[in-house]
Amino acid sequence: MKAYVYDDLPGDQRLAHDSGKAVDADALGKLGVLYYRIPEIDGVNELAKERGYKNRDEIFVSPEKMGAIYEEKVKSFFHEHLHEDEEIRYIRDGQGYFDVRSDDESWIRIQLAKDDLIILPAGIYHRFTTDESNYVHAMRLFKDEPKWTPLNRCPELDDNKYRKEYVEEFLS
Ligand code: KMT
Ligand code: NI
């Protein structure tokens, strides 16, 4: 895991966009973002038990696995959105970037690779992209029914119950 402030310069979303300003795991924790490096699947099983993640599946994001819809998918993952539940991703292979909104509205880019697990809290604005390798294989974990629905950012979404709870807990 490596995290830094996104440079916000034009250019493909899959480029590093590293401003050179590093961000550590503590700073991510203040935004409610939890990071773990878990080299063995047993560790994931333990965490899942502790936090009540009862279900899981696997996703391959690459032109080989997705075919013609790959570019479209990569663009859609990159739209700023939130979820009404945690987003949990365990990277099995390849790598990618999760961008999360900081308290000052800048983007923090989190580079994840094999054995990295991230938990984004409900209500945080975020987006995802593959990097220049165009390949990530991830496990998606969830509590009960998968609620993948991304709610794209718009002014009204600031009134969403889960957004308000997130702001109250982490940005106030
Ligand atoms: C998401 O929610 O953006 C995804 O599932 C992307 C692929 S998982 C690294
Ligand atoms: Ni998401």
Image (cartoon, rainbow, N blue to C red):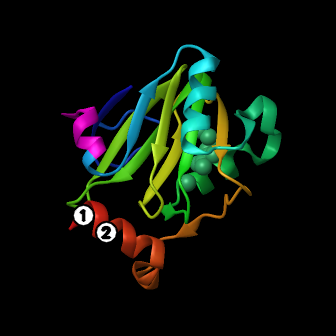
Quadrant in which ligand 2 is drawn: bottom right
Number of numbered callouts drawn: 2
Pointer 1 with pointer 2, Cβ within 8 A: yes
Residue identifier under label 1 = 171
Q: Is residue 117 above or below residue 79?
A: above
> Which amino acid type is shown beneath numbered disc 1?
Leu
Q: Is residue 78 left or right of residue 22?
A: right
Kindly give the residue lying farthest to the top in the view shown: 39
Badge 2: residue crowd in 10 Å (few <14, some 14–19, many ≥20): some
The residue segment tinted magenta is: 20-29
The residue depicted at 66 percent of the width and 40 percent of the height is 140
Q: Is residue 147 visible?
A: yes
Residue 167: which numbered mark, if any? 2
Q: Which mark is residue 72?
A: none
Say which residue appears at 48% left-offset and 43% top-offset: 119
In the displayed structure image, the side of residue 129 where residue 68 appears, left or right = right
Where on the picture, by quarter, is residue 28?
A: top left
Where, quadrant-wise, is the C terminus in this rendering? bottom left
- Residue 18 is one of the magenta-drawn residues: no
